[in-house]
Structures are given as structure tokens and as C-alpha cells.
Amino acid sequence: MSKLIYILNGPNLNLLGKRQPEIYGSETLADVERDCIRVASDLGLQVRFLQSNAEHQLIDWIHEAREDAAGIIINPAAYTHTSVAILDSLNAFDNPIIEVHISNVHKREPFRHHSYVSSVASGVMAGFGTQGYQLALQRMAVLVAAANK
């Protein structure tokens, strides 16, 4: 079975390190990608690291992952709280899904407390900063190994 993990990032994450560093920190998305590639390699995984501001592009990548990926790690960003379409596409994915948020969404505005994605996720990382991606990869390695038994 494939050990490829799709890491999908939603809107405005291309501005990571520049947008609201008091909430999201100073690391860039390129820094996060570099760290994920290193951690994945240590865990015997490969990653496909992608970002889009367009909902339909994220959905297309989820559909693509159905054929190629052992798991999806997704930070849907603002689409977390609004996108039934992303939920529906994730419902068609049969392997583990981990939802990641850099900030603790539960300490923020009330509208951020609801996630459509959480209902299909095997786990949720929130409030661990960009380290949440690395933690998600560690958990994903366990889930992928269990699925291969």
C-alpha cells in the first residue's frame, strides 16, 4: 500500500509568516513543508504538500488522493467552518484524515468553534502552532501502519 500522505492547506496559508504572526507565528508555509518532508522521511512516509485559496482545487486534490494516498492531513483554514463540499469530498476518501489548525480555534471567535471536517477526521490537531503538522504526521504513520496489518 502507498505511504503517500497528502498535506492540503486552504486559503490564506500562503501568507503564513506574514499574516497575523501573533496568532499564526513567523514560520512560512515553505518552512512547514520542509519540516514535514523531513519528519515524513524519518517515518517512512512521502508527502505531497499543496496549498490553494480555491475550494474547488482542494476538492480536486482530495479526489486525486482517493487513488494515490494512504492518508490526508488537511488544514482547510476558513473552509473548515463553511464547506460542505469539502466535507462531502472527504467522505468519499476511505483512508485516515487528520485535521490541523495552527491556532486553537476554540479560544477564538465562536464561528470558528464549528468544523465540518472534524466529523470525518480520525483526529484533530489545534493550537500546537506549525508543530501540529509534525504531530499529525506522527499519528498518521501509526494509522497507516495499523491499516496495513
Image (cartoon, rainbow, N blue to C red):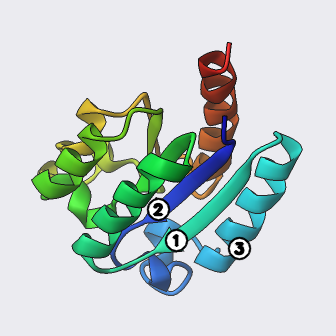
The crowd level at tag 1 (other Cα within 10 Å; few <14, some 14-19, many 20+) is some
Task: Give the position of the N terminus as an image quadrant.
Answer: top right
Residue at 47% x, 85% y is: 15
**What is the secondary structure assignment of the residue under circle 2?**
strand
Sooner in the amino-acid sequence: mark 1 or mark 3? 3
Give the labeled residue for mark 2. 8
Closest to the observer, 66 or 16? 66
Instruction: Return the x and y of residue 111 as percentages of the image width and height.
Output: 12, 53
**In the image, is 63 to the left or to the right of 126?**
left
Sooner in the amino-acid sequence: mark 2 or mark 3? 2
**In the image, is 45 to the left or to the right of 27?**
right
The alpha-carbon separation of the residues under discs 1 and 3 comes to 13 Å
Give the labeled residue for mark 3. 31
Instruction: Return the x and y of residue 18 as percentages of the image width and height.
Output: 51, 87
Q: Quadrant of residue 29?
A: bottom right
| Amino acid at pointer 2 | Leu
